Every structure is written in C-alpha cells, then in structure tokens.
Image: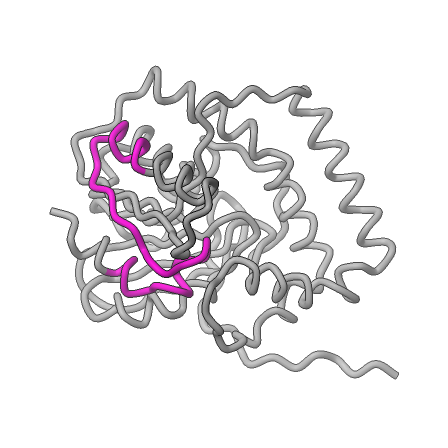
Amino acid sequence: MNQPVRTRPAPGRMVRVGGLPLHVLREGRGPLCVLSGGLGMAWFDWDAVAALLASYRTVVRFDRPGLGLSAAARRPPGLAAEADRIAQLLDALGHVGPATVVGHSLAGFHAEAFARLHPARCAGLVLVDGSIEEDPRPRLPRAVRTAWAGGLAGALSAAGLPQLLGPAARRLITRASTVGRHPRHGWEHAGYRTSRVLRACVLENATYPYQAAELAALRRHRPLPALPVAVLAAYDGSESPRGLRWLERQRALAAELGGHFAVAAPSGHLVMADAPGAVVRAVLDLP
C-alpha cells in the first residue's frame, strides 16, 4: 500500500480573495512589498528573498489560483483579473496604502498591469527577468486554445502523470533555470503531484500570448503612473548571442518604462534562487 506523503504544516494562511481561498504569507515589517512568481511557481520560490527582505519590508507572497496551496481556479487566467487579484489581496489583508510589487517572469505582466489599472495602489515596480513580447499576436481564438489546454490537462491527470512525474519535473525545471546548487524546498509534493497544479500550469502557459496582447493594448490606453521602476535581468555569464540579446531586450523594456536597468549575475531565470540579494537591492534602491 502506498503511504501518504508527509509534509510539514503550511507556513501561511488561507485568505478568501474574490471568493477563492488563496494561500498567503505575510512577514516582516515596514513598507509593503508584494512578491509574485512566474509561470507555475509557488510561494516557496521566494524563501531566500523573503528572508533577506523581511527586515526592511512587510513582505506578502501568495499562490495564484491552482498553484502552490491555493484553491483551483474557476476560469483560465487573464491579465486584468490577475492585476485585480493583487488589489483584492491587499484589501483582504487590510492594506490600504500603496505597495511595491515585484513580478518575476510572467508575473511581470501582472505587476505592470496592476500599476496601470490601480495606480493609487502601486508605490513601485520591480520586474525580475520579466517576460517580454514586443509584438504579441495570438494565432488561435482564446476559447479554442484554453479548451484544448484544459482537455490536455485532464488527459494527463487521468493518466496519473502529476503523481508520477510532477515533483521530479518541477525539480528538473528548477535545475535548468538556475546556475547554482540549491537545497530542495521539500514542498514539491505538496502541490506538484496534483492535477490542480498541473491544470493551473497548463492554463497559464496557454493564456500567455493573450496576456501579452492584453498588456500591449493596456500600454496604449493606460499610461504608467509616475513611480519608480527597476528591471532586473538574469545573466549567466555566457557570451551566447541569445543571452546577450535577452539583456538588450530587458534594457529596452527598462527604457520603455522609464526605469532603472540592472543585471543579476551569475544567475539563471530563477533570479530569486540564484541572486536573492540582487532582488532585495532592487527593491530597497527604489527611490
């Protein structure tokens, strides 16, 4: 008989946001800072950053619907909905003042959208190796792509793939996205072996081009408020044309947003694991 996977108690608490229970951690003291991870990521990916930042900031990190320990999403994600979710989370926690929002990868879209849609709630932006799409043009209707993605997630779940390969796949992705060796968090079994997290990951991937297109439209119609912005790009030290081109795209994003550009090196895409101090400095150096 298979023994149940034993995990330590969750470090945060469940907070109802927009009618959905989300897993949230609040730590530290000082001005408010919200950390939001990239596609398919969970609260524990920010452990090293939160440990350093909590001495200077009140740090809030949360799992988006279906990810980490949060309840399953009712519908596929969208850019405006994710920006609104940050505002609703702050309301649920009783934070009425503005917050600095740190968005990694895909969540860079969400952080920027939050600043444009909720300008009075945003004190500053830090985009950590944020996603960039200069000319997003989704090829399929959104409903078609999300229906296909939902069906794929259902088929993979029915085949038992999350239980068999979920935690191992998560560790492989982490290893491929970092340049250093990092201890296991021990939380992969808490979510990545479930169909709930698999479905959330597949849907975030499926809706990525539509969220990019939504942000491109938002940039045309909702100006970014006058606030400090930092763009922190990952650089692993190689001289590959692809890596150097990525740095230039990140630099161009900083210029477009009127922000400060910095490089975290050596670092893979998971900057919060490879260079947590660089993330903390980017936050604390905002004017």
Q: Residue at x 20, y 46 (%)?
A: 97
Q: How many marks?
A: 0
Residue at the farthest left position: 287
Q: Quadrant of the N terminus?
A: bottom right
Query: Would residue 203 appear left or right of 109 to someone viewing this image?
Result: right
Q: Identify which residue, 237 or 275, lies in the foreground.
A: 237
Q: Residue at x 46, y 48 (%)?
A: 17
Please check the rendered image and state whether residue 267 is part of the magenta-colored stretch, yes or no.
yes
Residue 136 sits above or below residue 95 on the image: above
Q: Residue at x 54, y 48 (%)?
A: 39
Q: How far across and down, in percent of the image, does residue 170 sit? A: 63, 62
Please check the rendered image and state whether residue 272 is part of the magenta-colored stretch, yes or no.
yes
Residue 59 placement: quadrant: bottom left
Query: Would residue 261 appear left or right of 239 to someone viewing this image?
Result: left
Residue 279 sits above or below residue 17 on the image: below
Q: Identify which residue, 171 or 196, lies in the foreground.
A: 171
Colour basis: one colour
Residue 137 sits above or below residue 84 on the image: above
Q: Identify which residue, 266 or 120, lies in the foreground.
A: 266
Q: How far across and down, in percent of the image, does residue 168 sit? A: 68, 67
Q: How far across and down, in percent of the image, does residue 258 sit? A: 21, 31
Q: How far across and down, in percent of the image, does residue 42 sit? A: 51, 59
Query: Would residue 102 appear left or right of 184 to someone viewing this image?
Result: left
Query: Magenta segment range?
Result: 251-280
Q: Residue at x 46, y 73 (%)?
A: 11
